[in-house]
Image: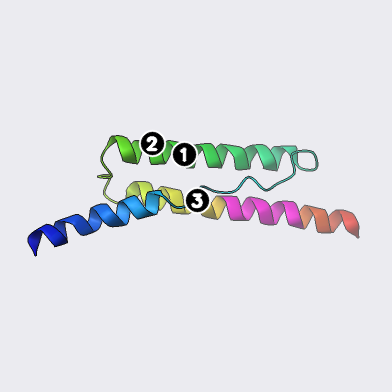
Amino acid sequence: MKLLLCSIPFVLAASAALAEPPADNISRHRHPNLAAAQRLSTQASEKIVAAQRANEWDLGGHAQKAKDLLDQVNHELKEAAETANEEHHH
């Protein structure tokens, strides 16, 4: 039972790290600055995964929280691009 309980955090961390990185889905032609920011957030997420692997997933949940925040950043950047698109169509 103790072995099972000890392995749960590892399994959760490993499955979280395998989640998709943030998408690069902003047009770099229409919104070069937002697209660049999105690429940087994707790169940051990839570096966090590398840090998790290097530290055998033992980062106290902080790396996953950072990745979650980067997902939120990515979503907000996409929303900003879509808002700009709507503003230019009116």
Count of marks overlaid on the render: 3
Tell me what residue is drawn at x 9 percent, y 65 percent. Answer: 1
Q: Residue furthest bottom?
A: 1
Amino acid at circle 2: Ala
- Where residue 24 appears, as percent x and y from the top left, is 63, 45
- Going from the N terminus, do you reach mark 3 or mark 2 first? 3
Q: Is residue 12 left or right of residue 18?
A: left
Marks 2 and 1: in contact by CB < 8 Å? yes
Q: Secondary structure at mark 2?
A: helix
Tell me what residue is drawn at x 38 percent, y 54 percent. Answer: 16
Q: Main secondary structure of the magenta part?
A: helix
Q: Is residue 52 above or below residue 72?
A: above
Amino acid at circle 3: Glu
Give the Cα separation between the discs numbered 1 and 2. Answer: 6 Å
- Where residue 7 appears, as percent x and y from the top left, is 19, 55
Q: Is residue 32 left or right of residue 39?
A: right
Q: What range is drawn magenta here?
A: 74-82
Disc nearest the viewer among 1 and 3: 3
Give the Cα separation between the discs numbered 1 and 3. Answer: 10 Å
Using a 10 Å C-alpha cutoff, classify the residue at mark 3 as few (fewer than 14 neighbours), some (14 to 19) or many (20 or more).
Answer: few
Q: Provide the residue designation for mark 2.
A: 50
Q: Is residue 76 left or right of residue 64?
A: right
- Where residue 74 appears, as percent x and y from the top left, is 58, 50
* Magenta span contains residue 33: no
Q: Provide the residue designation for mark 3.
A: 20
Q: Provide the residue designation for mark 1.
A: 46
Q: Secondary structure at mark 1?
A: helix
Amino acid at circle 1: Glu
